[in-house]
Image: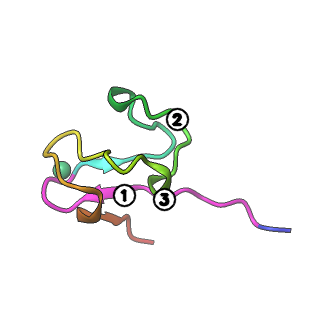
Amino acid sequence: MSAVEKKRCYYCIPCGYMYDPEQGDPDYDIPPGTAFEDLPDDWVCPLCGASQDMFEPEGD
Ligand SMILES: [Zn+2]
């Protein structure tokens, strides 16, 4: 049995925007419950346009 995976919030290093998997990103048609890892490759920070490799998982 695998434990329930808790999807992690990721924040944008340059601007501090937080991606919350429980909310998704309606502006990009990202449905709630979408993990950061499952975002489409062309998804970028909605605030500053930083690419996904500029994001870090929120600390434990
Ligand atoms: Zn940003």
- Closer to the camera, 7 or 45? 45
Q: Which quarter of the image is occupied by the N terminus?
A: bottom right
Q: In the rendered image, which quarter is residue 48 located in?
A: top left
Q: Residue at x 36, y 58 (%)?
A: 10
Q: Residues within 10 Å of mark 1 (few under 14, many from 20)?
A: many
| Residue type beneath disc 2 | Pro
Q: Is mark 1 within 8 Å of ligand 1?
A: no
Q: Which residue is mark 1?
A: 10
Q: Which residue is mark 3?
A: 8
Image coords of residue 33 (percent x, y): 56, 41
Mark 2–mark 3 contact, CB under 8 Å?
Answer: no
Q: Residue at x 48, y 46 (%)?
A: 21
Mark 3–mark 1 contact, CB under 8 Å?
Answer: yes
Q: Is residue 15 magenta?
A: yes
| Residue type beneath disc 3 | Arg
Mark 2–mark 1 contact, CB under 8 Å?
Answer: no
Q: Which residue is mark 2?
A: 32
Cα–Cα gap, marks 2 and 3:
13 Å
Q: Is residue 53 left or right of residue 48?
A: right
Q: Is residue 24 left or right of residue 42?
A: right
